[in-house]
Amino acid sequence: ELPMPSLLHPMLPLSSTPKPPANSPAYDGPFAVHSTRTKSLHTVAAVPKTTSETRINKAEDDYHATVKALNSKGRFPRKSLGQHYMLNSEVNDQLVAAADVQEGDLVVEIGPGTGSLTNVLVNSGATVLAIEKDPYMAALVTERFSSLDYVKVLQEDFTKCHIRSHLSVVLQSRMNSSGVKPKYAKVVSNLPFNISTEVIKQLLPMGDIFSEVVLLLQEEAAVRMVDSSLRSSEYRPINIFINFYSDPEYKFKVPRTNFFPQPKVDAAVVSFRLKQPVDYPPVSSAKSFFSMVNCAFNGKRKMLRKTLQHICPSLEIEEALVSAGLPSTSRPEELALYDFVRLHNSIVKP
């Protein structure tokens, strides 16, 4: 969970909102407003304007719009919910472009906040299912898009909701209104950082209903999830999990100055292109496979013949490793995804 600024100012009316010093784009306080955008490490083209923008009067969400929206509900960002609101509409454009959102797409957004990303998704022609845990923010987004029948807001905790049921209801309504049913939905979200790993574990095995998951995450976590280099201290079971179910790609960095309140670390956007179930690595049981992987990493510095001997005798583990072209003394950080697959299929009986 990202730390909040040490001093969280009360929400002020716009007339008394603090302004950054003149000619000082480097100002980076919690209420920073930048007249010049910080360049990201990678550039993603913004979504071009289309006729779908006539669906709603487009108003860019910036610092003032965000504060005004929060003031309307007497709210301020809640640390317990990991709330950090996006102030830069260009980043939202890039986030939607990274997901290649097209007219007619069905998009799930987790934690819409004040609806700034929702606004860009709508103007890209998507039908949006927004899931917001905070009842005040859910009410704000519902009110903001109340005139649009292609935005549905659910006041629920995403990690506990039945997303398949909700999607089927939205798809049914889409069939009734347009006669066209998208084959897969997408997830596009400026995700509350404190639930990112939990949400990824929940979403990635859903390749049968989602084609792509594009998330804004803490940069450190984003790099860790995409880079699955062996023999790295950051190599963990989550890397095996992510590559089992998806093809991840680091898209671009988002400096911390784009958020309110400003966190102490930068963020980054990652795309997870989900694999279809038929394309998963061939294991007899995903449950037993990940159970084996987790056990292996419980003793990360120990040899696999020791950490997995509760599954089968050490000698069989050594033989399985050698037959896979690996040293009999291998440790978990030395095995890539398909090395673990071969090991599992050799030592775990169906």
Image (cartoon, rainbow, N blue to C red):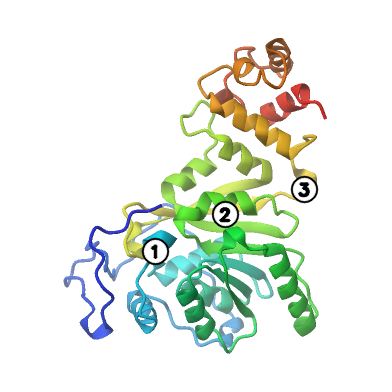
Q: Which residue is mark 3?
A: 277
Residue 129 visible? The answer is yes
Q: Which residue is mark 2?
A: 199
Which residue corresponds to the image point at 66% horizontal and 33% vertical from the top-left? 291
Which residue corresponds to the image point at 58% horizontal and 51% vertical from the top-left? 200
> Which residue type carries mark 1?
His
Crowding at mark 3 (Cα within 10 Å: few <14, some 14-19, many 20+) = few
Secondary element under disc 3, as helix, strand or loop, is helix
Give the quarter of the image for residue 239: top right
> Which residue type carries mark 3?
Pro
Q: Is residue 178 above or below residue 229?
A: below
In the displayed structure, does residue 81 sit left or right of residue 169? left
Residue 98: x %, y % from top left: 55, 60
Residue 192: x %, y % from top left: 47, 60
Q: Is residue 347 above or below residue 111?
A: above
In the displayed structure, does residue 134 sit left or right of residue 261? right
Residue 123: x %, y % from top left: 56, 79
Q: Earlier in the sequence, mark 2 or mark 1?
A: 1
Secondary element under disc 2, as helix, strand or loop, is helix
Q: Which residue is mark 1?
A: 84
Q: Earlier in the sequence, mark 3 or mark 2?
A: 2
